[in-house]
Amino acid sequence: MPEIYYVERGGRRYAYKSSSVYEPGSKYPRTVNEYIGRIDEETGKIIPKKTKAVEPKLSDWAGLKAKRHGASHALFEIAKECGLREDLFNSYGGDGERVLASAVAQALSGGPMSSAEDTIEGSTVRELLGIGGSFTSPQMSLLTQALGGNTGGLETLFEKRIGRAGDVLCYDITSVSTNSRLSGWGEWGHNRDGEKMPQMNIGLITDRRGRPAGFETYPGSIADVATLRRTVERLKALGAGKCVLAMDRGFGSASNQRDMIADGISYVIPAKAGTKCVKELVTQLVKEEKNPDAVMVHGGTAYSVVQTKAAVVRKKKPSDEDGESDNTRELEIILENDPRFPSVPENETIDVHACYDAKKASDERNRMQIALMNIESKLRGMDPWEAVRNVKKTAGGYAKFFELRVEDDCLVIERKRNSVSFAMNREGIFVMFSRNIGTWEEMMSVYDCRMYVEQAFDVLKNELDGNRWRTSDPMTAKGRLVIKFAALILWQELLVKLRDAGIQEPVSSVLQSLDNIMAVGTGTEWRTTEISKKNRTVLERTELPRIGPRLVLEPYQYIPEVYLQN
């Protein structure tokens, strides 16, 4: 029979159980002592020792499943960190959770909306968000149609995201082709992908790091410059009136700048080369490019810079302008040496910087000379008369540098020396319009973020399956864009984290690698597989929460912390 005995150590008594165990082949029994607990000093009873919980074996779990977990975990944590989950809840209530789940599925698979169900079921998206319901194609159609028609929810979402965007916003527009007319929204226009199809235009607003803050949709025939007025009005209505807008040269028309000046909007826009005042500045800069007093440095690059002032005034005589000029039929941009400039109030003037980059000039000159030689070689390989007829098609934008004729059935190619010389003098030179920015260095820093909105468009079209509308209903198309907008926020947030951590790997590769971390289990009890050193490094350097060996999930309804506090 087992016997209980006590041992006193440090003023406390501990209970042990002693028993004899007979082992085969042994003449005498073996004594086994087992600690069973501490004696309570007041009651004299034994306080049992703590026992470690024994985890059930995975083989004991019924309905065992294996799901991709790492990438879902990362995107879910990013959604919480950047406030997207809270903003979606504030905008769409319970449907905000379904939008987030669909957005995570888009970021993971990049396929059409009809593949959301397969992606969600194959990953821990549903478990991490604690939501049920179906994500089949019919259900996704109902969801996107409801989202597209919920104008109030969309305005709330944009207000929240713009409120988080900071003081610098970037704006650009792109086209998305469609096989249908989208009830009049799909129209013929300038297709940026070079496709001969109707299109719908999308204007995208991002912060200075490329994280989306809002979007607009327009019929396909609407010109870029015509969209800016509506965008500025909407930004002011959403509380972003004090921001700085960074835009591409397509938005720098004299009328657009006049409207932004009237609205008190600060902006940075590169000028078009064909504008009269720009030509004057280029001529002045060519004379000053070797002046050491004109040298400024930004981002490790030295520039020769000429600074002056400009203003938007009415033309003396209305005249049409081509697409290479910022002037319009009624308005033009003038420099401070123009007699009309003194009549313009100081608070309506524009800062102008003409900049020369020697390295960029060298690269452009090399690229231009190679292109001209290749075009000449191609033209000489063609039938002489066909070459003359199709020179614009063959040479593209370089056609203005050539003069072709046929003599004695032989093709004669001559370069237009004045045109070539003028182009060479402009190589490496760019002119920037800005208002209320401050120094040249600050202006350049603001414009640097312009490339991020272009990267965001590239992700939207190529990674998130946004290069084609697959619906004939404009409301459904807008609802799908809401989901892609949320997915783009997650993608760009992760991109910023990778960029800040010095990780050069593409976002798609990082997500694919993280998805090698699996969760195995069922119900609320899951265990994760081993994490590779590469994935562990990514999680640590991007400051995302670590993935533990166990994943315990409880069913819950998401409510933002601010509501719980109230």
Image: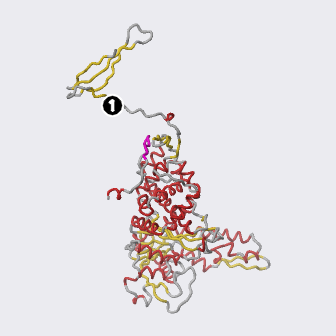
Visual colour scheme: secondary structure
Residue lying at the far top in this picture: please name it: 27
SS at badge 1: loop
Give the position of the N terminus as an image quadrant.
Answer: top left
Q: Is residue 3 above or below residue 492?
A: above
Residue at position x 66%, y 77% from top? Answer: 402
Count of marks placed on residues: 1
Is residue 79 highlighted in magenta? no
Front in this rendered view, residue 257 or 289:
257
Instruction: Determine if residue 14 is in view.
Output: yes
Q: Position of residue 365 (x, y in %)?
A: 57, 70
Residue 166, percent from left and from top: 39, 66
Instruction: Specify whether 220 is left or right of 165.
Output: right
Q: Residue furthest right?
A: 408
Quadrant in the picture for the C terminus: bottom left
Instruction: Say if residue 71 shows up in the picture.
Output: no
Residue under numbered circle 1: 50
Q: Which residues are magenta?
A: 548-554
User: Foreground residue, 307 or 82?
Assistant: 82
| Percent x, y of residue 258 | 45, 82
Amino acid type of the residue tagged 1 in the rendering: Lys
Residue 134, above or below 223: above
155 sits left or right of 35 in the view: right
Label 1 environment density (alpha carbons within 10 Å; few <14, some 14–19, many ≥20): few
State the image quarter where residue 24 is shown.
Answer: top left
Q: Is residue 358 left or right of residue 371?
A: left
Q: Farthest residue toward the bottom?
A: 317
Residue at position x 54%, y 56% in the image:
106
Q: Is residue 552 magenta?
A: yes
Task: Give percent across and percent down for residue 481.
Answer: 53, 64
